[in-house]
Image (cartoon, helix red, strand yellow):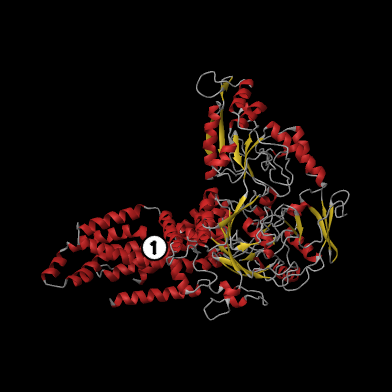
Amino acid sequence: MTRYIVRRLLQAIPLLLVISLILFVMMQNATDPLATMGGRTPTRPEDRARLTRQLGLDKPVYLQYIYWLIGNDWTKVDLDGDGVAETPGKRHGVLRGDFGTSIVQTGRPVTTVIWERLPNTLILMLTSEFVIVLGALLLGIYSALRQYSLFDNILTGLLFIAYSMPIFFVALSGMYIFSINFQRWGLPHLPTVGMFDPKIGKTTGQIILHMILPVFSIAFISFAAYSRYIRSTMLEVLGQDYIRTARSKGLPKREITFVHALKNASLPIVTIVGLDLPLLLGGAVVTERIFAWPGMGRLFLDGIDRGDTPVVMGILMLIAFAVVIFQILTDIVYAWLDPRIRFD
Amino acid sequence: MKHLKTVLFLMVAFMLVLSACGGGAAATDAPAADDPAAATEAPASATEAPAAEKKVTTFIFTQEFDNLNPLYTNQWFTAITYQIWNCYAWTYDDKNAPVPVLVTELPSTENGGISDDGKTITFTLREDIVWSDGTPITSEDFVFTYNMYMDSANTVASQSPYDEMESVTAPDERTVVVTFKDVFAPWAATLWKGILPKHILQAEYDAAGSLNESSYNRTPEVGCGPFNFAEWEAGSFARFVANDNYWLGRPTIDEIFIRFVPDDASQIAALQSGEGDLGTFIAYSDIPALEEAGVLMFTAFSGYNEGLYVNLGEKGHPALKEQGVRQAIAYAIDRESLVNDLLLGRTGVAATYWDNTPFVDPSIAPYPYDPAKANELLDAAGWTDSNGDGTRDKDGVELILKYGTTTREIRKEIQAVFQQQLLEVGVGTELINAENFFDGYAEGGPAATGELDIFEYSTTANFPDPHTSEWGCDQIPTDDAPDGSNWQAVCDPELDALASLEATQVDAAARQETFYQISRLIFDQAYWIGIYWDPDIWAVNSRLTNVKISGATPFYNIQEWDIK
């Protein structure tokens, strides 16, 4: 197993390099970090020329990528525009742990910018994932055990309606019903925006209160896919010979369902969850924006809008790295769930 | 079940850990030692200080600050906070009259503050101005600010207007002398918008070689506004507390929270629910719901007038070269109804490019809606529907115009209305909504490169100053000079001469007369056809009192605001 993990990690290095190159080139061509530097008016040509030079954007893309990767402290840059590169570069490059500084938030290390937001996103997304998986397990198993029953049919219909709703509609509807209208009707109501009320402070109670609507929105549209998947895998397992054997042995139904069937049905579920978990780091772009949740999704969206390449690259590389790690973890969980799987 | 309990326990424990490390510590970023509200930084509880006695208000901003240092951002939402915690040397009131803040009065030729050649401007500072830590604000702070803007080690957002200067000197503590390379007419609208404290930042600059990574950029320990910066939690909010040392009087409000809510619909919800007391850039369609919730609307004109630019360049439609055709377009569109129906009667029809600025020519009224007059002018210009296809033509060229704008919803709706009205007088249009509308000539922007026959947007350069470079012949973008701002490619020698003249006039009355001539010429020639005034609309909770909002410096009297 150890050899397998080491081999997978080594394989990931060229993969991450290729991913970083593709993303870097895409960002360079898709956005203009100087477009919004003028505020409400377009950036002046004089400022554009100066900033292009100071930020190193006048260099060819391949050179900018090399500086991003290995830094520019081995060369000199021309800051004053006199045509002479006399100022030593300060960047160390990603390979030496320096993800650079944000263009929009001048001078702030990308790692600091991301770290400010990462815990907020994890709070929201892990809670949502937990609610989704738990809810989907309950619904999926219940549906599988009562296939084609009235409950199964109604649930299937409702889940597909929820699945087909855009999340912004669910989120804004929730906000207007449970925040504004409940307040208007004199009922206990939920807050509209933010992670907490700044007048009260970042307390656990405040975070839980502010998390209800965002988690509800994310979970509402996600139950369908998960629960349908669990339902179908459970149905497949419930038809297996060993389940019939367990039944004929007279084992209790609960034990058959949760011990024999669910454990065997969970292998494909683990694959899906394993793929989803690293993506949680990216946050929920739409939900975070609507509820003004200070997470990675908003940071990512702002970064794209403003052409903040170092920040966007930092987020994307974090996710890419997490995908690799979680894939390896998923493989390990496979082996634990199914003793027949041996990676060595 | 046991496993489920364990999982739930771990989940809650994990959340608590994340809550603890998720920036809560950052929220207490370096408040000033004498911060009178420092006690409120920890989460409030029932046993703490009597928070109810404090006057606290919450603003909603749809953009978070990039950076609080004036050097590093031109972002509007940041710049307007300088009237809260930093300071402008002077602000403008809700009638656009200047209000001295750091200076005794605004320099003029009459008071001797502006030299005869117009290039040297002398500012006299008030005697009582101090930073929030009590240190006097002196002319050295102004010189330091200038030096930092011009230092190539600082990646400043814009060097304007400091790069127009030859020098900034401080002959004594109370006098600042600015010498421009050439006469620079818009100085009053562009200079000294945020000052840097030399006594804090000089040492930092000397040690690091630049201010790019200074802690002042996010946690400015001193300011010169009516409030002091207290904290900024990334993505969530910033907090400002009353400055006891403010020389124009301590603010009535004790604390201001600015919450960052990027989504427009969520901003409206927060204002409706009372979680926010103030927000801006309110869409016309949201006004009724806010008013129903008891929120007051303030309209602040900031120089923006939505209008149609007519492309007179080589790529533009040949019909537009004729004055009669341009005027016919102005007569053919019903702007009065558009303002009443689409914009709920909340604004007015724009007659000139400078409507609602101090330089507007009040004698100019918008072209009335008169399709018969439009038909008459088009007929006279020789554009008739000779082939009966519904659009006019001449010499085999159909009068179908490429009408472009941004992807903003209200602009799309206006396009649809105008398309129908123009077709009624035989002018066809092809509607274009470009994501890259504002891209310049070098980037291939459709307006800048002349791909559009008529295009719609609004802009202003240095409100309340009227200066714009958009009408100069030398500003028509070309391959050799791609940065020009005259995208409509209007090159009228008379207009060009007047535009050059106003840029060098420091006498306000003479300059106003020049702008009257410019406005009349553009109006008569229909080089630009006004559509509607595009003010900033602010939503303010009725519990806030004494609120006045200026288009140029919205929070100019914030120290006088109160809470019922």
Please, is residue B491 above or below residue A336 in the view? above
Q: Nearer the viewer, residue A189 or B563?
A: B563
Please, is residue B350 above or below residue A149 in the view? above
Query: Dot 1 surroundings within 10 Å: few (below 14), some, or many (20 or more)?
Result: some
Report the residue that reaches farthest toward the bottom.
B47
Q: Position of residue B125 (x, y in %)?
A: 82, 63
Q: Position of residue B539 (x, y in %)?
A: 58, 56
Identify the chain of the residue marked 1, using the numbered disc in the image.
A
Q: Is residue B127 left or right of residue A163?
A: right
Q: Nearer the viewer, residue B199 or B264?
A: B264
Residue type highlighted by circle 1 = Phe
Q: Nearer the viewer, residue A239 or A191?
A: A191
Residue at (37% x, 61% y) in the render: A219
Q: Is residue A11 visible?
A: no
Please, is residue B25 above or below residue B115 in the view? below
Q: Is residue B345 left or right of residue B515?
A: left
Q: Is residue B180 visible?
A: yes
Q: Nearer the viewer, residue B179 or A246?
A: B179
Residue tagged 1:
A216
Residue at (86% x, 51% y) in the render: B109
Q: Position of residue B527 (x, y in %)?
A: 67, 34
Quarter of the image where one finds residue B312: top right
In the rendered picture of this protein, how many numbered marks are placed on residues? Answer: 1
In the picture, the quarter occupied by the C terminus of chain B is bottom right
Element type at mark 1:
helix
Report the residue that reaches farthest toward the left.
A248
Q: Is residue B339 left or right of residue B211?
A: left
Q: Is residue B412 left or right of residue A77?
A: left
In the picture, the quarter occupied by the N terminus of chain B is bottom left
Q: Position of residue B129 (x, y in %)?
A: 78, 68
Please, is residue B423 above or below residue A45 in the view? above
